Image (spheres, helix red, strand yellow):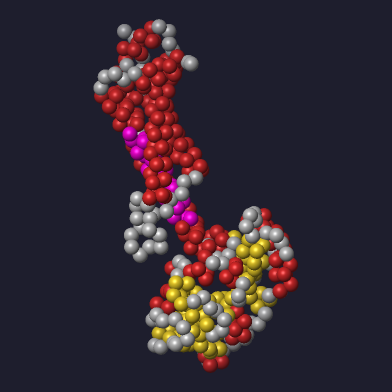
Amino acid sequence: MRLPQFIARRYFFSRHSTTAVNILAGISITGLVVGTAALLVILAAFNGLEDLVKGFYATFDPDLKVSAKVGKNFPYDEKQTKDLLKWDDIESISPVLEERVLLRYREQEFIASLKGIDSTFTRTTDIDEAVFRGNYRVSHPDAVLGIGVAWHLGLSTTGRTEAVQLYVPKASARNMLQPDRAFNQDVVYAAGIFAVQPDFDARYVLSDLHRLQQMSDQEGTVSSLDIRLADGARLNRTQRNVQDFFGDGFRVENRNEQQAAFFKVMKAEGLITYLIFSLVLLISSFTLLGSLSMMILDKKKDIHTLWFLGMTKKQLRQIFLYEGVIITISGALVGLVLGGIIVLLQHYFGLVGMGPGYIVDAYPVRLNITDVAKVVATVLVIGSVISVISSRRLRIFKS
């Protein structure tokens, strides 16, 4: 072991008296412990929140979505679907047609997105599990409404007791100033009401695909093909293969790309929070600067003795550099253990609740090795920089 490292370890582990230096060193370690644990817990909380939101979208969004790059809709080729279903990586495919429609119930009106689907949609998504009132039934004239759409319409009952007027714009209509010619009119009944995520709940109504194609004068046309992958399928590879299958005229998006704007915002929020807590950690680490500076003054006699015994200024500075690194590593390790315990307790026992009215009872958390490495790197960089700055303040005065 090199001599500066040995002396630094002796200074760290051989504290028999309570002095201002020892107190400052303890405060430095405590600050690093708290900062490290807090940063780890925050990152785990963001991971848990991201998983929770992805779970909401997974109920409604498919693994892969195929849509046209140019234009809103495209002709549905059933042969293509049959060819894709022969792939081992694909479990199911659902044709979907989406149109903006006007809903009228009693005196209330609301513009919603009507999603025309067939019986395969429940094999491609888990939307039927999100129906909390009534039943999942989309064969004409039944429909399933989002809870937000039902609220805007003032509709609280399900079944074929109350009809909802449906106005669908014709694709071939030219004069929108004559509603009787521009729209096809029909009625639907709310067979069920679903709740997935506020953005979906206040926008979508699910109904029969073939009926919507007829009403919008778009028979044989779809807006997208929703694909569910088989268990064990590799997402990126399958996405590339599906893209090659359809060609450049189509867009193949995975679940994150379908909600790209939202997940970009979440990533930005996570990055900003990480930077803020890193700044807090940096501020709390300034006690390390004070601790090392006080130690240099406290060990002034030792420094002169070692200087006269032949140690160079570089070696003397390395003593306090290593001392700072030891304090940093100690605080980081204890902070990681403390943060890990807090995350595990939250995961298994739900220490922090979400409050009434939320889908989950406790705040979700998830810890991964990438976050641990990020926290360790952050703490070590901050501690090492401060240790270098502190060690360079050492001055030798010959007596």
Examine the residues drawn in magenta and state their main secondary structure: helix
Instruction: Tell me if 103 is positioned left or right of 90 in this view.
Output: left
The x, y position of residue 117, in whole percent, is 59, 76
Q: Residue at x 55, y 79 (%)?
A: 138
Q: Which residues are magenta?
A: 30-51
Q: Nearer the viewer, residue 360 or 40?
A: 360
Vertical side of 383 occupied by 180: above or below: below
Q: Which of the image's four quarters has the C terminus? A: top left
Q: Is residue 271 visible?
A: no
Instruction: Tell me if 17 is positioned left or right of 386 in this view.
Output: left
Instruction: Tell me if 246 is positioned left or right of 55 in this view.
Output: right
Could you say which quadrant of the image residue 302 lies in? Answer: top left
The x, y position of residue 17, in whole percent, is 26, 19
Tell me if residue 43 is in the magenta stretch: yes
Tell me if residue 45 is in the magenta stretch: yes
Q: Residue at x 66, y 74 (%)?
A: 74
Vertical side of 344 occupied by 203: above or below: below
Vertical side of 174 occupied by 272: above or below: above
Q: Residue at x 44, y 55 (%)?
A: 49
The x, y position of residue 246, in whole percent, is 71, 65
Could you say which quadrant of the image residue 198 lies in? Answer: bottom left
Q: Nearer the viewer, residue 164 or 270?
A: 164
Q: Residue at x 53, y 78 (%)?
A: 137
Q: Nearer the viewer, residue 214 or 386?
A: 214
Q: Is residue 318 visible?
A: yes
The x, y position of residue 219, in whole percent, is 65, 82
